[in-house]
Image (cartoon, rainbow, N blue to C red):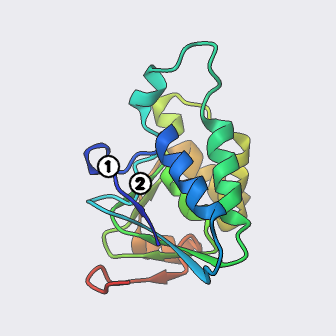
Amino acid sequence: MLSLSNASRRNALDEATLDALERALLDDQGVRCWLVRREGGHFCSGYDLQALAKLDESDPLPDERIGAVFDVLATRAAATVAFVEGGAFGAGFELACACDFRVAAPSATFCIPPAKLGIVYAPKGIARVAGVVGAGRARNLFLTGRRVPAAEALALGLADELGDEARAF
């Protein structure tokens, strides 16, 4: 099981989290299934925008690193399942799409808001989302930045199943 545990930042991703995720995924001896879930109120609020402020202008943006780590997740031999409770925003949305299956709890909300934030999203991430929901739906989600609740996520093919937050995995 891979648990995102940074509740004070709504489980936002940063370099340390991406490093830990990659190390865990590369040590997959005997793993039959990866479950990606959250600790705290949100699945993942995306990449930590405060970490962006700490970057020197000569530092690369985290897009390539995010894409590389999510590629590792997407290519595991064992099945990967994202159990989404609370918000899955930005890179958290893409993280869910990198998994083979997505189970949405009733509290799940998916949103990919770069257009609202004035941020250009990485082409690899756009392609990953489009691979799950289709190009037209991905375009709509990226350009509107609208929030998609669990039931609609199921109808869009974003979620494979609706789950129960009370059920422990």
Q: Position of residue 82 (x, y in %)?
A: 50, 71
Q: Secondary structure at mark 1?
A: loop
Picture quadrant of residue 119: top right
From mark 2 to mark 1, how far is it between C-alphas?
6 Å
Report crowding for label 2: few under 14, some 14 to 19, many 20 or more residues within 10 A (C-alpha).
many
Number of numbered discs on residues? 2
Q: Position of residue 118 (x, y in %)?
A: 51, 28
Picture quadrant of residue 136: bottom right
Residue on which disc 1 sits = 10
* Residue appearing at x 64%, y 74% in the figure: 100
In the rendered image, the residue lying farthest to the bottom is 167
Residue 41 in view, yes or no: yes
Which dot marks residue 145?
none
Q: Secondary structure at mark 2?
A: loop
Q: Is residue 49 above or below residue 89?
A: above
Asked whether disc 2 touches disc 1, contact meaning CB atoms under 8 Å apart, the reply is yes
Label whose residue precedes the other's in the sequence (2 or 1): 1
| Along the viewing direction, whichever of 45 and 130 lies nearer the viewer | 45
| Along the viewing direction, whichever of 121 and 167 lies nearer the viewer | 167
Q: Position of residue 11 (x, y in %)?
A: 37, 51
Q: Position of residue 33 (x, y in %)?
A: 58, 81
In the rendered image, the residue lying farthest to the top is 57
Q: Amino acid at mark 2?
A: Cys
Q: Amino acid at mark 1?
A: Arg
Picture quadrant of residue 156: bottom right
* Residue appearing at x 56%, y 52% in the figure: 141
| Along the viewing direction, whichever of 91 and 55 lies nearer the viewer | 55
Residue 87 appears left or right of 135: left
Residue on which disc 2 sits = 44
* Residue appearing at x 51%, y 20% in the figure: 55
